[in-house]
Image (spheres, rainbow, N blue to C red):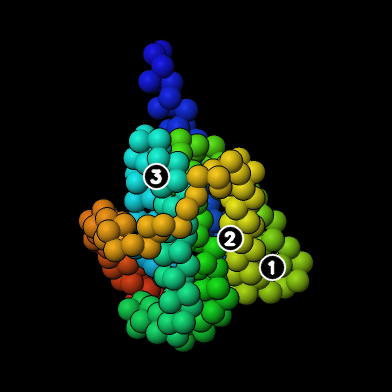
Amino acid sequence: MNRINKQILHIALPSIVSNITVPLLGLVDVAIVGHLGSAAYIAAIAVGGMTFNVVYWIFGFLRMGTSGMTSQALGRRDLGETVRMLVRSLGIAFAIAFALVALQTVLLRASLFMMKPTPEVASLVSAYFSILIWGAPAMLGLFSLSGWFIGMQNSRIPMAVAIVQNVVNIAASTLLVFGFGLKVEGVAFGTLTAQYAGFAMAIILCAKHYRRLKNHYTSRGLWCRKAMAHFFSVNRDIFLRTLCMVSVMLFFTSAGSWQGAKVMIIFQ
């Protein structure tokens, strides 16, 4: 195997493992509430999980766009721009996250309007959503960090973070649900804990492995119009493509929800 193929595998294999673990956060939640004895719990996790999937996937350009532009800067050996790209992406991610938190009531009402769950399920969805929305800064920030790591040709850190997130989620959710009897709220708090644990781990590993890059950083041009226009022009098509994909998934989840909790489980 030649050197280029080895480099590709070195980046691709950890990314494959990371992508495999992504659905586990939602699957673990469903598996836990599945033991609570009511289809309403599973339906609530399905509706709430789909809501967050739609919201977060729409902003997946934070990961994909950041990865591409970081790798271009690294290829030019412009280490200062690689650091500015991380700071720029994180700044945009936090701005979007705080907007989502501020608009959480609107988002919840829109989700319930589209899904049309039963009153029992709607109550559980509201409880789940009101807790997990506070994980938006961690999730979107982790998108930016993961994209930046991959752009720096390091996909092992995102893989490690994804694995730790799932372990923390399983442990925290199981403890809160079966140990403290919190039910849907316990699942939400467990997932929230895992999100911030993953984000904190990514920050720590970034500081540890890329500390030397701070010597190349300068804030000049960080938020200039040209840099921002380039960032959003590159990510515009990714945003639209993702929007089309999640619209289809949202339709099928909504169609199941309209038929009641048991049908919703079949759609999941």
**Quadrant into which the N terminus falls:** top left
The location of residue 12, given as percent across then percent down, is 43, 33
Mark 2: amino acid: Gln
Whichever of callouts 1 and 3 sits on the residue coming sooner in the sequence is: 3
Query: Callout 2: few (<14), some (14-19), or many (20+) C-alpha neighbours within 10 Å?
Result: many
Q: Secondary structure at mark 1?
A: helix
Q: Could you tell whether 222 is left or right of 39 in the image?
A: left
Q: Which residue is mark 3?
A: 70
Mark 1: amino acid: Val
Query: Callout 1: few (<14), some (14-19), or many (20+) C-alpha neighbours within 10 Å?
Result: many
The location of residue 72, given as percent across then percent down, is 34, 40
- Identify the image quadrant of residue 174: bottom right
Q: Are marks 1 and 3 in contact (CB under 8 Å)?
A: no
Residue in view at x 45 percent, y 85 percent? 105
Q: Which residue is mark 2?
A: 195
Mark identifier at residue 177: 1
245 and 75: which is toward the camera: 75
Q: Is residue 81 visible?
A: yes
The location of residue 250, given as percent across then percent down, is 32, 67
Residue in view at x 33 percent, y 62 percent? 224
